[in-house]
Amino acid sequence: MKRIVPIGPYHPLQEEPEFFKLIVEGEKVIDLEINIGYNHRGHEFIAQKLTWDQIPFLVERICGICSDSHPYACVMAIEDAAHIEVPLRAQYIRTIIGELERIHSHYLWLGLAGHFIGYNTVWMWVWRYREPLLDLFELIMGNRNHYAINKAGGARRDILPEDYPKIEKYLDLLEEKNTMFTKAVLDDPVIRARLEGVGILSREDAVAYAVLGPTARGSGYAIDVRKDEPYDAYDKISWDMIVCEEGDVLAKAKVRLLECFESIKIVRQCLKNMPDGPIENRVEEIPAGEGIGRHEAPRGEVFHYVRSDGSNYPIRHKIRAPSFMNIPSNEVAVRGYSIADAALVLAAVDPCYCCTERTVVYEDRKPKYSGADLLRLSWQKTETLRRRYKR
Amino acid sequence: MKKEYSREILDQISEKFPEILVKVHGPRRVYIRIPREQLYDLARFLHCELGFRFSIATGIDTRDGIEILYHFSHDKAGTFYSLKTVVPKDDPKIKSLADFLPAANWIEREVHELLGVDFTGHPNLVPLLTAETWPADLHPLRRDYRDEHEKMDEGRSRRGH
Protein backbone atom coordinates (compact mmCIF):
# COMPACT_ATOMS: atom_id res chain seq x y z
CA MET A 1 0.00 0.00 0.00
CA LYS A 2 1.39 3.36 -1.02
CA ARG A 3 1.70 6.13 1.50
CA ILE A 4 3.04 9.64 1.26
CA VAL A 5 5.68 11.08 3.57
CA PRO A 6 5.99 14.83 3.14
CA ILE A 7 9.31 16.41 4.14
CA GLY A 8 9.52 20.17 4.37
CA PRO A 9 9.22 22.80 3.10
CA TYR A 10 10.52 24.82 6.05
CA HIS A 11 13.02 23.76 8.62
CA PRO A 12 15.66 25.70 10.57
CA LEU A 13 18.39 23.29 9.43
CA GLN A 14 17.72 23.95 5.78
CA GLU A 15 19.47 26.67 3.88
CA GLU A 16 16.77 26.61 1.25
CA PRO A 17 13.18 25.56 1.74
CA GLU A 18 12.29 22.53 -0.35
CA PHE A 19 9.45 20.11 -0.28
CA PHE A 20 10.11 16.43 -0.74
CA LYS A 21 7.15 14.13 -1.14
CA LEU A 22 8.34 10.60 -0.46
CA ILE A 23 6.05 7.91 -1.77
CA VAL A 24 6.63 4.87 0.40
CA GLU A 25 5.51 1.30 0.59
CA GLY A 26 6.01 0.11 4.13
CA GLU A 27 9.44 1.46 4.99
CA LYS A 28 10.74 1.50 1.44
CA VAL A 29 10.83 4.66 -0.64
CA ILE A 30 9.50 3.91 -4.10
CA ASP A 31 9.29 7.38 -5.57
CA LEU A 32 10.04 11.00 -4.85
CA GLU A 33 8.47 14.24 -5.95
CA ILE A 34 10.34 17.48 -5.38
CA ASN A 35 8.80 20.90 -5.19
CA ILE A 36 10.79 24.12 -4.83
CA GLY A 37 10.06 27.81 -5.07
CA TYR A 38 9.05 28.52 -1.47
CA ASN A 39 11.64 31.21 -1.19
CA HIS A 40 11.91 32.57 -4.71
CA ARG A 41 13.39 36.00 -4.24
CA GLY A 42 13.71 37.09 -7.85
CA HIS A 43 17.44 37.84 -7.84
CA GLU A 44 17.65 37.78 -11.64
CA PHE A 45 14.88 40.34 -11.81
CA ILE A 46 16.46 42.57 -9.16
CA ALA A 47 19.88 42.33 -10.85
CA GLN A 48 18.48 44.01 -13.96
CA LYS A 49 17.86 47.13 -11.92
CA LEU A 50 21.25 47.40 -10.26
CA THR A 51 24.52 48.76 -11.57
CA TRP A 52 27.48 46.51 -12.36
CA ASP A 53 29.17 47.57 -9.11
CA GLN A 54 26.15 46.69 -6.99
CA ILE A 55 25.51 43.24 -8.45
CA PRO A 56 28.31 41.35 -6.63
CA PHE A 57 26.82 42.54 -3.34
CA LEU A 58 23.40 41.34 -4.39
CA VAL A 59 24.52 37.87 -5.50
CA GLU A 60 26.61 37.52 -2.35
CA ARG A 61 23.33 37.36 -0.48
CA ILE A 62 21.91 34.47 -2.49
CA CYS A 63 23.39 31.99 -0.04
CA GLY A 64 24.97 32.48 3.35
CA ILE A 65 27.27 29.48 2.98
CA CYS A 66 28.48 30.10 -0.58
CA SER A 67 28.80 33.80 -0.06
CA ASP A 68 32.10 33.84 -1.94
CA SER A 69 31.07 31.59 -4.84
CA HIS A 70 28.31 33.68 -6.37
CA PRO A 71 30.20 36.99 -6.48
CA TYR A 72 33.24 35.04 -7.70
CA ALA A 73 31.38 33.62 -10.71
CA CYS A 74 29.58 36.92 -11.21
CA VAL A 75 32.73 39.05 -11.44
CA MET A 76 34.27 36.46 -13.76
CA ALA A 77 31.24 36.81 -16.03
CA ILE A 78 31.65 40.59 -16.05
CA GLU A 79 35.39 40.23 -16.70
CA ASP A 80 34.64 37.81 -19.54
CA ALA A 81 32.17 40.25 -21.10
CA ALA A 82 34.55 43.19 -20.89
CA HIS A 83 37.82 41.25 -21.46
CA ILE A 84 39.36 42.46 -18.22
CA GLU A 85 42.65 41.04 -16.94
CA VAL A 86 42.99 40.43 -13.22
CA PRO A 87 46.30 41.30 -11.49
CA LEU A 88 48.25 38.30 -10.23
CA ARG A 89 48.04 39.17 -6.55
CA ALA A 90 44.27 39.53 -6.76
CA GLN A 91 44.07 36.11 -8.40
CA TYR A 92 45.89 34.53 -5.47
CA ILE A 93 43.74 36.36 -2.91
CA ARG A 94 40.54 35.19 -4.57
CA THR A 95 41.80 31.60 -4.73
CA ILE A 96 42.70 31.60 -1.03
CA ILE A 97 39.27 32.84 0.03
CA GLY A 98 37.54 30.42 -2.36
CA GLU A 99 39.39 27.48 -0.85
CA LEU A 100 38.91 28.54 2.77
CA GLU A 101 35.23 28.80 2.01
CA ARG A 102 35.24 25.26 0.65
CA ILE A 103 36.62 23.99 3.96
CA HIS A 104 34.01 25.77 6.06
CA SER A 105 31.19 24.62 3.78
CA HIS A 106 32.32 20.98 3.81
CA TYR A 107 32.63 21.11 7.59
CA LEU A 108 29.12 22.43 7.89
CA TRP A 109 27.88 19.47 5.84
CA LEU A 110 29.95 16.95 7.76
CA GLY A 111 28.69 18.23 11.09
CA LEU A 112 25.07 18.03 10.03
CA ALA A 113 25.52 14.61 8.42
CA GLY A 114 26.92 13.45 11.79
CA HIS A 115 23.89 14.88 13.55
CA PHE A 116 21.54 13.06 11.21
CA ILE A 117 22.96 9.65 11.84
CA GLY A 118 22.99 10.29 15.59
CA TYR A 119 26.70 11.06 15.96
CA ASN A 120 26.39 14.32 17.79
CA THR A 121 30.04 14.12 18.82
CA VAL A 122 31.05 14.43 15.17
CA TRP A 123 28.75 17.40 14.84
CA MET A 124 30.16 19.22 17.89
CA TRP A 125 33.75 18.45 17.04
CA VAL A 126 33.57 19.50 13.42
CA TRP A 127 31.84 22.74 14.19
CA ARG A 128 34.32 23.37 16.98
CA TYR A 129 37.10 23.54 14.36
CA ARG A 130 35.00 25.41 11.84
CA GLU A 131 34.64 28.28 14.26
CA PRO A 132 38.28 29.53 14.16
CA LEU A 133 37.99 29.64 10.37
CA LEU A 134 35.11 32.09 10.61
CA ASP A 135 37.19 34.15 13.04
CA LEU A 136 39.95 34.09 10.44
CA PHE A 137 37.53 35.46 7.84
CA GLU A 138 36.63 38.25 10.23
CA LEU A 139 40.30 39.02 10.69
CA ILE A 140 41.01 39.18 6.95
CA MET A 141 37.85 40.73 5.61
CA GLY A 142 36.01 42.18 8.57
CA ASN A 143 33.09 39.78 8.36
CA ARG A 144 32.49 36.21 9.41
CA ASN A 145 30.28 35.80 6.37
CA HIS A 146 29.53 37.90 3.29
CA TYR A 147 33.19 38.69 2.81
CA ALA A 148 32.79 41.01 -0.22
CA ILE A 149 36.28 40.17 -1.47
CA ASN A 150 35.47 39.95 -5.19
CA LYS A 151 35.25 42.89 -7.50
CA ALA A 152 35.23 43.03 -11.28
CA GLY A 153 38.89 43.50 -12.15
CA GLY A 154 40.41 42.28 -8.90
CA ALA A 155 39.87 41.97 -5.17
CA ARG A 156 38.46 44.54 -2.79
CA ARG A 157 40.80 43.82 0.08
CA ASP A 158 44.39 42.77 0.41
CA ILE A 159 45.59 40.01 2.68
CA LEU A 160 48.24 41.65 4.85
CA PRO A 161 51.61 39.89 5.17
CA GLU A 162 51.35 40.00 8.96
CA ASP A 163 48.22 37.85 8.70
CA TYR A 164 49.98 35.03 6.79
CA PRO A 165 51.33 33.33 9.96
CA LYS A 166 47.84 33.36 11.48
CA ILE A 167 46.41 31.62 8.42
CA GLU A 168 49.27 29.13 8.38
CA LYS A 169 48.81 28.40 12.06
CA TYR A 170 45.16 27.64 11.46
CA LEU A 171 46.01 25.41 8.49
CA ASP A 172 48.37 23.38 10.69
CA LEU A 173 45.63 22.89 13.26
CA LEU A 174 43.16 22.03 10.53
CA GLU A 175 45.38 19.47 8.88
CA GLU A 176 45.78 17.63 12.17
CA LYS A 177 42.06 17.73 12.92
CA ASN A 178 41.01 16.82 9.40
CA THR A 179 43.22 13.72 9.61
CA MET A 180 41.43 12.87 12.84
CA PHE A 181 37.97 13.35 11.30
CA THR A 182 38.86 11.37 8.21
CA LYS A 183 40.02 8.47 10.36
CA ALA A 184 37.09 8.78 12.76
CA VAL A 185 34.52 8.81 10.00
CA LEU A 186 36.02 6.33 7.57
CA ASP A 187 37.25 3.78 10.12
CA ASP A 188 34.17 3.64 12.29
CA PRO A 189 32.24 0.45 11.39
CA VAL A 190 28.88 1.93 12.43
CA ILE A 191 29.27 5.05 10.31
CA ARG A 192 30.46 2.87 7.47
CA ALA A 193 27.41 0.64 7.79
CA ARG A 194 25.13 3.68 7.74
CA LEU A 195 26.74 5.36 4.73
CA GLU A 196 28.09 2.55 2.60
CA GLY A 197 25.90 1.37 -0.25
CA VAL A 198 23.19 3.89 0.61
CA GLY A 199 21.73 6.35 -1.89
CA ILE A 200 23.78 5.17 -4.84
CA LEU A 201 23.80 7.51 -7.82
CA SER A 202 25.26 5.67 -10.81
CA ARG A 203 27.62 7.39 -13.21
CA GLU A 204 25.03 7.20 -16.02
CA ASP A 205 22.44 8.97 -13.87
CA ALA A 206 25.05 11.51 -12.80
CA VAL A 207 25.70 12.35 -16.47
CA ALA A 208 22.00 12.42 -17.41
CA TYR A 209 21.08 14.69 -14.51
CA ALA A 210 24.26 16.73 -15.13
CA VAL A 211 25.09 16.78 -11.41
CA LEU A 212 28.04 18.82 -10.20
CA GLY A 213 30.72 19.03 -7.57
CA PRO A 214 31.21 16.33 -4.91
CA THR A 215 27.93 14.70 -5.97
CA ALA A 216 29.38 14.09 -9.44
CA ARG A 217 32.89 13.26 -8.26
CA GLY A 218 31.50 10.79 -5.72
CA SER A 219 29.89 8.93 -8.62
CA GLY A 220 33.08 8.68 -10.66
CA TYR A 221 32.12 11.60 -12.92
CA ALA A 222 35.39 13.55 -12.89
CA ILE A 223 34.41 17.16 -13.46
CA ASP A 224 35.83 20.15 -11.68
CA VAL A 225 35.92 23.63 -13.17
CA ARG A 226 39.16 24.34 -11.31
CA LYS A 227 40.83 21.59 -13.37
CA ASP A 228 38.73 21.68 -16.56
CA GLU A 229 38.85 25.39 -17.12
CA PRO A 230 41.50 26.66 -14.69
CA TYR A 231 41.07 30.25 -13.65
CA ASP A 232 42.95 32.56 -11.30
CA ALA A 233 45.69 30.69 -9.42
CA TYR A 234 44.40 27.14 -9.87
CA ASP A 235 46.72 26.28 -12.76
CA LYS A 236 49.74 27.90 -11.11
CA ILE A 237 49.88 25.47 -8.21
CA SER A 238 49.75 21.70 -7.87
CA TRP A 239 46.75 19.90 -6.42
CA ASP A 240 44.64 16.85 -7.20
CA MET A 241 41.02 16.31 -8.07
CA ILE A 242 39.39 13.80 -5.69
CA VAL A 243 37.18 11.24 -7.42
CA CYS A 244 35.45 8.21 -5.89
CA GLU A 245 33.70 5.58 -7.95
CA GLU A 246 31.06 4.14 -5.60
CA GLY A 247 28.38 6.84 -5.80
CA ASP A 248 26.99 6.20 -2.30
CA VAL A 249 26.80 8.61 0.62
CA LEU A 250 30.15 7.36 1.94
CA ALA A 251 31.83 8.26 -1.37
CA LYS A 252 30.42 11.78 -1.19
CA ALA A 253 31.62 12.16 2.40
CA LYS A 254 35.04 10.82 1.39
CA VAL A 255 35.30 13.29 -1.50
CA ARG A 256 34.47 16.19 0.80
CA LEU A 257 36.88 15.14 3.54
CA LEU A 258 39.77 14.55 1.17
CA GLU A 259 39.04 17.78 -0.68
CA CYS A 260 39.69 19.67 2.54
CA PHE A 261 43.29 18.37 2.42
CA GLU A 262 43.60 19.65 -1.14
CA SER A 263 42.23 23.02 -0.08
CA ILE A 264 44.83 23.20 2.69
CA LYS A 265 47.49 22.38 0.10
CA ILE A 266 46.22 25.07 -2.28
CA VAL A 267 46.05 27.80 0.38
CA ARG A 268 49.55 26.95 1.66
CA GLN A 269 51.05 27.18 -1.82
CA CYS A 270 49.18 30.41 -2.55
CA LEU A 271 50.54 32.01 0.62
CA LYS A 272 54.03 30.84 -0.24
CA ASN A 273 54.00 32.06 -3.84
CA MET A 274 51.91 35.18 -3.33
CA PRO A 275 53.30 37.85 -5.64
CA ASP A 276 53.43 41.55 -4.79
CA GLY A 277 51.65 44.15 -6.80
CA PRO A 278 48.31 45.86 -7.29
CA ILE A 279 45.11 44.08 -6.32
CA GLU A 280 42.77 45.53 -8.91
CA ASN A 281 42.55 46.83 -12.43
CA ARG A 282 40.14 49.69 -12.70
CA VAL A 283 37.16 48.91 -14.87
CA GLU A 284 36.11 51.92 -16.88
CA GLU A 285 33.05 50.58 -18.66
CA ILE A 286 31.35 47.36 -19.64
CA PRO A 287 30.92 47.24 -23.42
CA ALA A 288 27.87 45.72 -25.08
CA GLY A 289 28.20 41.96 -25.19
CA GLU A 290 27.84 38.88 -23.08
CA GLY A 291 29.96 37.00 -20.61
CA ILE A 292 29.99 33.71 -18.75
CA GLY A 293 31.60 33.09 -15.39
CA ARG A 294 32.13 29.67 -13.85
CA HIS A 295 33.49 28.91 -10.41
CA GLU A 296 33.76 25.61 -8.59
CA ALA A 297 31.81 26.26 -5.42
CA PRO A 298 31.86 23.74 -2.54
CA ARG A 299 28.74 22.13 -4.00
CA GLY A 300 29.74 22.29 -7.66
CA GLU A 301 29.95 24.66 -10.58
CA VAL A 302 28.28 28.04 -10.10
CA PHE A 303 27.31 29.55 -13.41
CA HIS A 304 26.64 33.22 -14.14
CA TYR A 305 25.71 34.70 -17.49
CA VAL A 306 25.47 38.43 -18.04
CA ARG A 307 24.48 40.46 -21.04
CA SER A 308 25.27 44.11 -21.38
CA ASP A 309 23.93 46.71 -23.79
CA GLY A 310 26.79 49.08 -22.97
CA SER A 311 24.85 50.88 -20.27
CA ASN A 312 25.45 50.80 -16.55
CA TYR A 313 22.90 48.03 -15.98
CA PRO A 314 22.85 44.46 -17.25
CA ILE A 315 19.93 43.54 -19.46
CA ARG A 316 20.02 39.95 -18.28
CA HIS A 317 21.78 38.18 -15.47
CA LYS A 318 21.28 34.43 -15.29
CA ILE A 319 22.33 32.67 -12.11
CA ARG A 320 22.56 28.91 -11.76
CA ALA A 321 23.55 27.45 -8.41
CA PRO A 322 24.82 23.85 -8.30
CA SER A 323 21.94 22.64 -6.15
CA PHE A 324 19.58 23.38 -9.02
CA MET A 325 21.16 20.46 -10.86
CA ASN A 326 21.94 18.29 -7.83
CA ILE A 327 18.54 18.19 -6.16
CA PRO A 328 16.62 16.52 -9.06
CA SER A 329 19.11 13.62 -8.94
CA ASN A 330 17.56 12.65 -5.59
CA GLU A 331 14.69 11.22 -7.62
CA VAL A 332 16.91 8.30 -8.58
CA ALA A 333 19.27 8.27 -5.58
CA VAL A 334 16.63 7.80 -2.90
CA ARG A 335 14.53 5.18 -4.68
CA GLY A 336 14.59 1.75 -3.08
CA TYR A 337 16.04 2.76 0.29
CA SER A 338 14.30 2.86 3.66
CA ILE A 339 12.74 5.96 5.23
CA ALA A 340 15.43 5.87 7.92
CA ASP A 341 18.02 6.43 5.19
CA ALA A 342 16.01 8.97 3.21
CA ALA A 343 16.95 11.96 5.34
CA LEU A 344 20.61 11.12 4.91
CA VAL A 345 20.41 10.49 1.17
CA LEU A 346 18.56 13.71 0.51
CA ALA A 347 21.13 15.55 2.60
CA ALA A 348 24.05 13.88 0.85
CA VAL A 349 24.03 16.20 -2.15
CA ASP A 350 24.33 19.03 0.39
CA PRO A 351 21.42 21.11 -0.76
CA CYS A 352 19.61 21.08 2.48
CA TYR A 353 19.39 19.09 5.62
CA CYS A 354 16.16 17.39 5.34
CA CYS A 355 13.84 18.77 7.71
CA THR A 356 13.16 15.64 9.56
CA GLU A 357 11.49 17.54 12.32
CA ARG A 358 8.79 18.81 9.99
CA THR A 359 8.06 15.40 8.63
CA VAL A 360 4.66 13.88 9.17
CA VAL A 361 3.35 10.59 7.84
CA TYR A 362 -0.36 10.61 7.25
CA GLU A 363 -2.37 7.45 7.62
CA ASP A 364 -6.12 7.84 7.32
CA ARG A 365 -5.58 11.58 7.59
CA LYS A 366 -4.04 11.26 11.04
CA PRO A 367 -0.33 11.84 11.65
CA LYS A 368 1.54 8.56 12.01
CA TYR A 369 5.12 9.70 12.41
CA SER A 370 5.09 13.17 13.89
CA GLY A 371 7.69 15.85 14.34
CA ALA A 372 11.09 14.58 15.29
CA ASP A 373 10.17 10.93 14.71
CA LEU A 374 12.11 10.64 11.47
CA LEU A 375 15.27 11.85 13.12
CA ARG A 376 14.60 9.35 15.91
CA LEU A 377 14.13 6.60 13.34
CA SER A 378 17.52 7.42 11.87
CA TRP A 379 19.14 7.46 15.31
CA GLN A 380 17.51 4.15 16.20
CA LYS A 381 19.06 2.53 13.17
CA THR A 382 22.50 3.76 14.21
CA GLU A 383 21.85 2.50 17.75
CA THR A 384 20.96 -0.97 16.47
CA LEU A 385 24.10 -1.03 14.37
CA ARG A 386 26.16 0.16 17.34
CA ARG A 387 24.91 -2.74 19.42
CA ARG A 388 25.63 -5.15 16.62
CA TYR A 389 29.20 -3.90 16.36
CA LYS A 390 29.45 -3.67 20.16
CA ARG A 391 30.69 -0.07 20.06
CA MET B 1 46.07 19.64 -23.08
CA LYS B 2 45.64 23.23 -24.18
CA LYS B 3 42.39 24.67 -22.91
CA GLU B 4 40.88 26.09 -26.04
CA TYR B 5 37.94 25.54 -28.38
CA SER B 6 38.83 23.21 -31.17
CA ARG B 7 38.46 23.85 -34.86
CA GLU B 8 37.60 20.18 -35.50
CA ILE B 9 34.54 20.25 -33.28
CA LEU B 10 33.26 23.43 -34.89
CA ASP B 11 33.86 21.92 -38.35
CA GLN B 12 32.06 18.77 -37.31
CA ILE B 13 29.09 20.83 -36.14
CA SER B 14 28.91 23.09 -39.18
CA GLU B 15 29.17 20.10 -41.51
CA LYS B 16 26.07 18.59 -39.94
CA PHE B 17 24.27 21.89 -39.44
CA PRO B 18 25.28 24.26 -42.27
CA GLU B 19 22.88 27.01 -41.18
CA ILE B 20 24.67 27.86 -37.96
CA LEU B 21 26.43 31.13 -37.24
CA VAL B 22 29.49 30.78 -35.02
CA LYS B 23 30.84 33.60 -32.89
CA VAL B 24 34.04 32.99 -30.94
CA HIS B 25 34.09 35.31 -27.95
CA GLY B 26 37.33 34.05 -26.42
CA PRO B 27 39.50 30.94 -26.51
CA ARG B 28 37.06 29.16 -24.18
CA ARG B 29 33.74 30.75 -25.16
CA VAL B 30 31.81 29.93 -28.31
CA TYR B 31 28.32 31.14 -29.21
CA ILE B 32 26.40 29.30 -31.92
CA ARG B 33 23.28 30.80 -33.46
CA ILE B 34 20.88 28.23 -34.93
CA PRO B 35 17.27 28.22 -36.22
CA ARG B 36 14.88 26.91 -33.60
CA GLU B 37 13.80 23.88 -35.65
CA GLN B 38 17.34 22.50 -35.56
CA LEU B 39 18.24 23.31 -31.99
CA TYR B 40 16.93 20.04 -30.60
CA ASP B 41 19.01 17.99 -33.06
CA LEU B 42 22.16 20.00 -32.41
CA ALA B 43 21.74 19.74 -28.63
CA ARG B 44 21.21 16.01 -28.99
CA PHE B 45 24.31 15.73 -31.16
CA LEU B 46 26.43 17.70 -28.67
CA HIS B 47 25.22 15.79 -25.63
CA CYS B 48 24.85 12.24 -26.94
CA GLU B 49 27.66 12.04 -29.49
CA LEU B 50 30.28 14.57 -28.41
CA GLY B 51 29.66 14.03 -24.68
CA PHE B 52 29.07 17.67 -23.77
CA ARG B 53 27.60 18.35 -20.34
CA PHE B 54 24.38 20.34 -20.22
CA SER B 55 24.94 23.31 -17.97
CA ILE B 56 21.78 25.43 -18.03
CA ALA B 57 19.43 27.38 -20.29
CA THR B 58 18.77 31.12 -20.28
CA GLY B 59 15.85 33.03 -21.70
CA ILE B 60 16.02 36.71 -22.60
CA ASP B 61 13.26 39.00 -23.77
CA THR B 62 14.74 40.96 -26.68
CA ARG B 63 13.39 43.24 -29.36
CA ASP B 64 13.33 40.45 -31.98
CA GLY B 65 11.60 37.90 -29.82
CA ILE B 66 12.51 35.67 -26.95
CA GLU B 67 16.06 34.51 -27.14
CA ILE B 68 16.81 31.12 -25.66
CA LEU B 69 20.32 29.98 -24.89
CA TYR B 70 21.28 26.42 -24.06
CA HIS B 71 24.69 26.31 -22.44
CA PHE B 72 26.86 23.23 -22.87
CA SER B 73 30.23 22.58 -21.31
CA HIS B 74 32.93 20.58 -23.02
CA ASP B 75 34.72 19.55 -19.86
CA LYS B 76 37.60 17.69 -21.50
CA ALA B 77 38.70 20.80 -23.37
CA GLY B 78 37.47 23.31 -20.77
CA THR B 79 35.39 25.20 -23.29
CA PHE B 80 31.86 26.46 -23.15
CA TYR B 81 29.38 26.39 -26.02
CA SER B 82 26.15 28.38 -25.93
CA LEU B 83 23.44 27.58 -28.46
CA LYS B 84 21.30 30.57 -29.27
CA THR B 85 17.94 30.72 -30.93
CA VAL B 86 15.15 33.27 -31.13
CA VAL B 87 11.47 32.40 -30.92
CA PRO B 88 8.90 35.01 -31.98
CA LYS B 89 6.72 36.44 -29.20
CA ASP B 90 3.46 35.60 -30.96
CA ASP B 91 4.47 31.94 -31.29
CA PRO B 92 6.89 31.17 -28.44
CA LYS B 93 7.34 27.46 -29.01
CA ILE B 94 10.40 25.25 -29.05
CA LYS B 95 10.99 21.51 -28.76
CA SER B 96 11.91 20.42 -25.25
CA LEU B 97 15.21 18.69 -24.53
CA ALA B 98 13.87 17.00 -21.42
CA ASP B 99 13.12 13.70 -23.17
CA PHE B 100 16.78 12.75 -23.55
CA LEU B 101 18.17 15.14 -20.93
CA PRO B 102 16.48 14.97 -17.50
CA ALA B 103 18.77 17.80 -16.41
CA ALA B 104 16.83 20.20 -18.66
CA ASN B 105 13.53 19.42 -16.97
CA TRP B 106 13.60 22.05 -14.25
CA ILE B 107 15.13 24.91 -16.20
CA GLU B 108 12.56 24.56 -19.00
CA ARG B 109 9.81 24.79 -16.42
CA GLU B 110 11.49 27.92 -15.08
CA VAL B 111 11.83 29.56 -18.50
CA HIS B 112 8.23 28.59 -19.22
CA GLU B 113 6.83 30.44 -16.23
CA LEU B 114 9.19 33.42 -16.20
CA LEU B 115 9.16 34.15 -19.93
CA GLY B 116 6.15 32.28 -21.26
CA VAL B 117 7.94 29.96 -23.66
CA ASP B 118 6.17 26.72 -24.54
CA PHE B 119 8.42 23.68 -24.56
CA THR B 120 6.66 21.12 -26.69
CA GLY B 121 7.07 17.54 -25.56
CA HIS B 122 8.01 18.46 -22.00
CA PRO B 123 6.75 15.77 -19.59
CA ASN B 124 5.58 18.09 -16.82
CA LEU B 125 5.41 21.75 -17.79
CA VAL B 126 4.03 23.16 -14.53
CA PRO B 127 5.39 26.24 -12.70
CA LEU B 128 8.56 25.57 -10.73
CA LEU B 129 9.27 28.74 -8.76
CA THR B 130 6.20 30.93 -8.68
CA ALA B 131 3.39 30.40 -6.18
CA GLU B 132 0.36 28.30 -7.04
CA THR B 133 -1.76 31.42 -7.02
CA TRP B 134 0.41 33.23 -9.57
CA PRO B 135 -1.52 34.00 -12.78
CA ALA B 136 -0.45 31.72 -15.64
CA ASP B 137 -0.25 34.53 -18.20
CA LEU B 138 1.95 36.85 -16.15
CA HIS B 139 5.66 36.40 -16.93
CA PRO B 140 7.98 38.35 -14.61
CA LEU B 141 11.01 38.45 -16.89
CA ARG B 142 9.14 39.84 -19.89
CA ARG B 143 9.96 43.47 -20.68
CA ASP B 144 6.33 44.54 -20.42
CA TYR B 145 6.00 43.15 -16.88
CA ARG B 146 5.93 45.71 -14.10
CA ASP B 147 5.60 44.82 -10.47
CA GLU B 148 3.24 46.50 -8.01
CA HIS B 149 5.98 48.72 -6.68
CA GLU B 150 6.73 50.08 -10.13
CA LYS B 151 3.09 50.67 -10.89
CA MET B 152 2.92 52.92 -7.84
CA ASP B 153 5.89 54.89 -9.10
CA GLU B 154 4.21 55.51 -12.44
CA GLY B 155 5.78 58.50 -14.14
CA ARG B 156 9.13 58.28 -12.42
CA SER B 157 12.10 56.82 -14.19
CA ARG B 158 12.00 53.02 -14.35
CA ARG B 159 15.31 52.60 -12.62
CA GLY B 160 14.97 55.49 -10.23
CA HIS B 161 15.91 54.64 -6.68
Image (tube, rainbow, N blue to C red):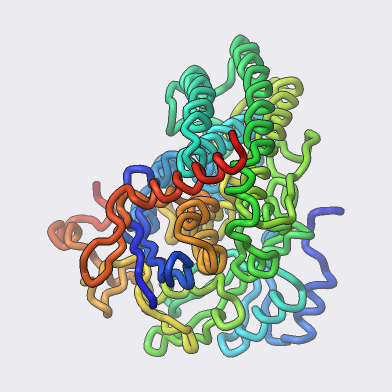
* Residue A231 % position (x, y): 69, 44
Please tell me which residue is depicted at 68% across the width and 86% down the height of the picture: B19
* Residue B12 % position (x, y): 81, 79
Please tell me which residue is depicted at 47% across the width and 74% down the height of the picture: B108
- Relative depth, front residue between A101 and B136: A101
Vertical placement of residue A297 versus A88, above or below = below
Q: Quadrant of residue B31?
A: bottom right
- Report the quarter where the N terminus of chain A lies: bottom left
Q: Is residue A82 visible?
A: no
Q: Residue furthest top?
A: A162
- Relative depth, front residue between B28 and B123: B123
* Residue B43 % position (x, y): 65, 78
- Report the quarter where the C terminus of chain A lies: top right
Please tell me which residue is depicted at 44% across the width and 77% down the height of the picture: B66
Q: Is residue A13 visible?
A: yes
Please tell me which residue is depicted at 30% across the width and 52% down the height of the picture: A358
Judge left or right: residue A204 versus residue A198: right
Judge left or right: residue A185 versus residue A38: right
Vertical placement of residue A224 versus B120, above or below = above
* Number of dots carrying numbers: 0
Q: Residue furthest left?
A: B152
Vertical placement of residue A269 versus A35, above or below = above
Judge left or right: residue B141 versus residue B49: left
* Residue A20 % position (x, y): 39, 63
Judge left or right: residue A379 versus residue B16: left
Q: Quadrant of residue A165?
A: top right
